[in-house]
Image (spheres, grey):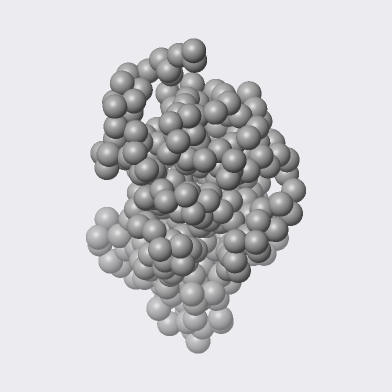
Amino acid sequence: MTKPPRHSLWKVISKTLNKKAVALFSGGLDSVLTVRLMLDQGIDVTALHFDVGYLLSPEIERGEDGADKAARRLGVALRRESLGADYIRMLMNPKFGYGKGVNPCMDCHIWMIKRARRIMEEIGASFIVSGEVLGQRPMSQRRDALEIIDRETQTRGILLRPLSAKCFDITEPEKNGVVDREKLQGIYGRSRKIQMDLAKNLGIEKYESPGGGCMFTDLNYAKRVRALFARKENPISLDFKILRLGRALKLSDKTGVVIGRDQEENEILEGYRDFSDAFIVPVNFKGPSAAILGCCNSDDISLVGRIIRHYGKKPEGIAVLRSVVDGRTGEFEVADPFPESDLSSFLL
């Protein structure tokens, strides 16, 4: 006879096994299929979506991103959780390391599943479902990696991966008849064709484009993030949002600058005015806004003013800019724009 999983949570689950689950839900194809497979078996699903700090679109800010739309199409409750300080600490020092960028894929999955487990207990659900597919992601979805995730999160037996379920040992919801294993999938590998065919067969026509990557895998963004880690001991989620904007420059090991590229980015940057160490805007000419992040002095502010002048329209007379530092507002003049030939040494 197979012994139950050896963790304290099992004592609770074995007595209260029910048709209620928490699903990790990005709103992408795999998570949509996962939830749909559970709904078709009568499972009451709470879709758990993590709001990642580097996402910026107005739709996301209003809670109308792909996850929200996908949950409404499926008819499931969407629970949104922010990635707080503990997530950022993990991001800065992941136990299992990074991929090519600053993507701690293993640690990120572990963090999210641990959070899902706590929410599962909170709402009285019996198990967790995830859209992970064996062999799909090189870092976090290898068989050995998934086994480590199960062990680190203490969810072996109560973490069900419906898209690859037949590639793994049977889980407790399947053993107990809560979920019919025969109606689950055995998908393996990186191709998404089987998932797209399955979506078509289930009548799912709208879903996020499959294969999208995490921004932390983007090498240019990763360069900005590493510079952030070097200059700031305790970054916050807003820092990652700002880094997604505009031109990023490194003035020193402790000082970075983000400069808007268009009116939309200027408006978004304006929303982070109070969270910047200094914020600079043109007064008498059209040009970008700039947020200084980290230690800065009057020389840094003057330098950024010249860079803004370089990217802006030519003013009539001397360029005037306004700075906001520690809540104090002042104006200063810039005679000459910063030369193009010298900008490359600052750009990230």
Task: Classify residue 42 as left or right of residue 146.
Answer: left
Residue at image x 41%, y 48%? 43
Q: What number of labels is visible?
A: 0
Residue 286, image x and y in percent? 49, 81
Q: Residue 155, relative to residue 230: is it above or below?
A: above
| Residue 314, image quadrant | bottom right
Observer-nearest of 340 and 241:
241
Residue 97, image x and y in percent? 57, 28
Can see residue 28?
Answer: yes
| Residue 126, image quadrant | top left
Residue furthest out toward the bottom: 316
Can see residue 94?
Answer: no
Q: Residue 104, relative to residue 1: is it above or below?
A: below
Residue at image x 37%, y 18%? 7
Q: Residue 171, relative to residue 193: is it above or below?
A: above
Observer-nearest of 48 and 301:
48
Observer-nearest of 285 and 111:
111
Residue 137, image x and y in percent? 66, 39
Observer-nearest of 119 and 315:
119
Task: Classify residue 179 as left or right of residue 337.
Answer: left
Residue at image x 43%, y 82%? 284
Residue 73, image x and y in percent? 46, 67
Residue at image x 53%, y 51%? 37
